[in-house]
Image: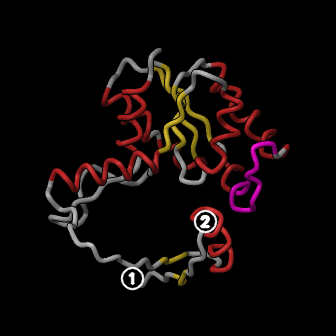
Amino acid sequence: SSMLGADSPVDDMPFTGVVYPAARAACQATQNGRIGIIGTPATVSSGSYETAIHNIDPSKDVTAMACPLFVHLVEYGYTDRNNPITRLAAEEYLAPIRSAEVDTLILGCTHYPIIADTIADIMGDGVQLISASEEAAKYAKQCLEEQDLLTDSTQHGHNVYYVSDSVSMFRENARHFLMDAVNGQVFSSRI
């Protein structure tokens, strides 16, 4: 989310990232003009969400917070709404966001929707959570429809998963995320 620029690195290849769709959704959702962002340290330090939000509407007040433990908590299965470790981390990370009185919070990492119920509990009523990954999927579909690139095939496709780390951890996480057993192959980049 912090590296995607405005132009495709490959000519004539449509693409989208997660930042713009989430920023657009947050700008549309906020009632008080205060938007929060939580993400990994790299994502938050890049300022990509703030830039996108201010490009859409410079009047929006943005508060961002890095939540580095969230990824590990999700990957190691600490995802129950009442898990005391996850709640403690969330209370700590979300305190500055709550103090800013945001009414819209971007979940700026694909792991964070897995603990959205905990985040929602701590943020309280009246704060709308925006899943960056969900908004990216909606936006990708919209772009494909606009360019008449959606398939009309009734055949089911197949998925191939390439992982950069532990295949066994990927299998376990995928089972948890996707509610299905999947397999992964280690991806090695050849330059």
Residue drawn at x 22%, y 67% as measured from the top left: 151
Label 1: element kind: loop
Residue drawn at x 63%, y 26% as measured from the top left: 97
* Residue 159 as seen in the image, left or right of residue 42: left
Q: Position of residue 10 (x, y in %)?
A: 22, 67
Mark 2 to mark 1 CA distance (whole Å):
35 Å
Query: Magenta residues, as a range?
Result: 72-82
Q: Residue furthest right?
A: 84
Residue drawn at x 59%, y 54% as measured from the top left: 111
Mark 2 — residue?
179
Which quarter of the rendered picture does the C terminus lie within? Answer: bottom left
* Residue 72 as seen in the image, left or right of residue 28: right
Residue neighbourhood size for the residue with mark 2, other residues' Cα within 10 Å, grouped as few (<14), some (14–19), many (≥20): few
Mark 1 — residue?
191
Q: Position of residue 42 (x, y in %)?
A: 55, 50
Q: Amino acid at mark 1?
A: Ile
Q: Is residue 101 above or below residue 69?
A: above
Label 2: element kind: loop
User: In front: mark 2 or mark 1?
Assistant: 2
Residue drawn at x 78%, y 40% as measured from the top left: 87
Q: Assess whether residue 19 is covered by the magenta stretch.
A: no
Q: Amino acid at mark 2?
A: Met
Q: Position of residue 169 (x, y in %)?
A: 68, 73
